[in-house]
Image (cartoon, rainbow, N blue to C red):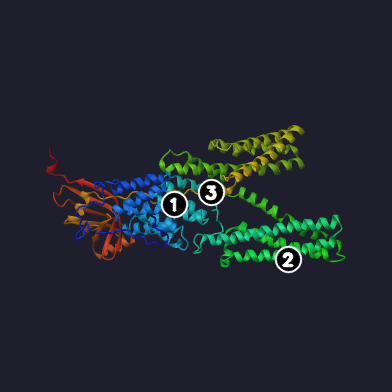
Amino acid sequence: MGTGPGDQYRPDHSDDHRDDHGKDNGKDHGDDKGDDSAGGSPRDRCREAVTCLDAGRPEDALTAARGAADLDPFSEWAHRLTSLAFERLGRDADALPPAREAVRLALGSWSARVRLASVLRRLPGHWDEALDEAALARRFAPEQPGPYVLDGDLALLRAEHSRAATAYRAALDLDPGHPQARVNLGLTLLRWDRPRAHHDPAWPVEPRETGRARRALEVWSRQARLLVALATLAVAVAALGFDRGAEARLGGFAVLVLLVPLTVGQARRVRVWSYVPAMLGRDPWLGTAVVSAAVSVVAFAAWLGLAAVPGLPSSFDPVWAGLAAIAVLGWPMLAALRALADTWRGRPLKALAEFTRAAGEPATVRNVAGERTARRNTGVALWIVLGRTWSLLVPLVCGALAVEPRAAVLAVAVPYPLVVSYRRARYREDRWLATATLLVVLAAAACAAGGLLGSAWAWRAGLSALGAVAAVFALRAVRAWWRGAPGPWRASLIMCDLPAGAEPPVALTSEARQAFAYARNVVLSYGDSLGPRVVGAVATVGPSGELRLIAGSEAWEAIEADPRVAVFAADPLQRRFWVEVRGIALADADLLRVTPKQVLMGEFPGRHQRR
């Protein structure tokens, strides 16, 4: 049975197999020599868990990872995979204790730090801690792309696009084929915002609370604008068409009274009023919707008030008409403005290049999910480019008709970026997009021909094609809405979020463990401001595979500034081989704990090499 969010994570750290001096008495934590009749060694079960995670079977992965942790409670890899399986199951609260346990077992493991940061960023009130863990991961493994991808994800979730792009480019410098870095870099170029743009993940409040507040504000603004628009039209028709001005005004004032209980009811649903100003600032369209609703209500009230004034001079007629226009046309104008702004935000052509490259990476287990995300985002980005093309063609063609028809020849060049991007992307999954692209090209060619030749039929064909593009987009949007599928709009863009922290740890072989556990001379190498330094140390091997050292205080001070170290030891029995462990050293009580990142072994030259 899984632990619930309130249960405490208590791995079994039994020391029955170890003596009082921390030496191993038979159980080898570092290799796969041990076997279990129920399903293999702990590392075998961890590999099985990774395979299940890659195949999209988190339940089986959780079973395998827990089995590995039961066999070897000191396996930080097993605890990391347990945390990852919980996260894939959507049990973020359950994912935190095993992630912390993995860090406790391997303080210098960058993978454990990445895993912990990935969990913390999903839990309210832990954002700053997630940033700290991500910084430690970068410090421990500057040569790995994973910590930089995590740093980019943290920045992207807060809409810090410049910082995110810098982090993703750093990851791609280390691994040009990293699918998550490539796809999410494309999102930064599009200036992507997460679906809950109103919520700052760094806030300690639950996202559901700010989500409830957002829904209340949206519902109120929608109800207020709809009621005001309908009431304005009804009052105008009753007054001008049926000469019922007085009764119509009374009905208008009744609508204003009806808005009071609606406003109070939605206000009671908002429990986080202290966050509302920041929410409106983070999501400009939410703020615009609320403000426009309030302006529409005020304009409607002022319109009714002016209409009730007897003998109003004719000079007030434009003001009266303008107030009515605000009340009626505010909503559609806002929707059109938002659609135009979403279309022209970011750099979709450069984003398409990143998505296309990510989708074209060689097929591997890691790239499968990244390729699916890249292909989906490619389709959305192409729709954005098509929207830009259409929004350029319409005013160009209309302006040519009104001023100089021959200027319509410029329309031929407008679809060129769209056509080139479509061909390079090789996107064939959306026939609606192909149809709309063809119609845009036909519209541009027909309008150009009409301008040059003065053909009315060419103009009609071009304008009809432009109208057909809008109809295709509308039908495609309705179809996506009906099926619950991704639509041709910016909100369908998704972030690539691959499993983080599943990498296997560097294990010490039984020979390396023996060398460090019984060696008479152990050398610790580190760096300080004056260059490399070496000191003697006393070493043993911890149950999780870490080296535990006792060294001088001068080494502690230098390692605090730069934790990257190397530890050397020789075979204590036959002195035939040497072992070098490169890793991350961190202080723990009166010991230095070294988490291995690389293990090197070699033979000393001597008589044993003679044949």
Q: Is residue 371 above or below residue 244?
A: above
Q: Is residue 350 left or right of residue 255?
A: left
- The residue that mark 2 highlights is 257
Q: Nearer the viewer, mark 3 or mark 1?
A: 1
For image coordinates 72% across by 62% down, the residue present is 297
Neighbour class for label 3 at 10 Å: few (<14), some, many (≥20)? many
Please state the horizontal and vertical placement of residue 41, each as a whole percent of the image.
28, 47
Please state the horizontal and vertical placement of residue 593, each as a whole percent of the image.
28, 59
Please state the horizontal and vertical placement of residue 495, each as a whole percent of the image.
50, 49
Task: Report if the CB atoms under discs 3 and 2 are less than 8 Å apart.
Answer: no
Judging depth in this view, the residue of 433 and 386 nearest the camera is 433
Task: Determine the residue located farthest toward the bottom in the rendered image.
Answer: 274
Quadrant position of the N terminus in the picture: bottom left
Judging depth in this view, the residue of 234 and 140 nearest the camera is 234
Name the mark on residue 189.
Answer: 3
- Residue 189 seen in the current view: yes
Judging depth in this view, the residue of 523 and 130 nearest the camera is 130
The kind of residue on which mark 2 rests is Val
Mark 1 and mark 2 lie on one chain; the one further toward the N terminus is 1
Mark 3 and mark 1 lie on one chain; the one further toward the N terminus is 1
Local SS, label 2: helix
The answer for how far apart the CA atoms under marks 3 and 1 are is 30 Å
- The residue that mark 1 highlights is 89
Task: Determine the residue located farthest toward the front in the rendered image.
Answer: 1
Neighbour class for label 2 at 10 Å: few (<14), some, many (≥20)? few
The kind of residue on which mark 1 rests is Leu
Quarter where residue 537 is shown = bottom left
Mark 3 and mark 2 lie on one chain; the one further toward the N terminus is 3
The answer for how far apart the CA atoms under marks 1 and 2 are is 48 Å
For image coordinates 69% across by 62% down, the residue present is 294
Local SS, label 1: loop
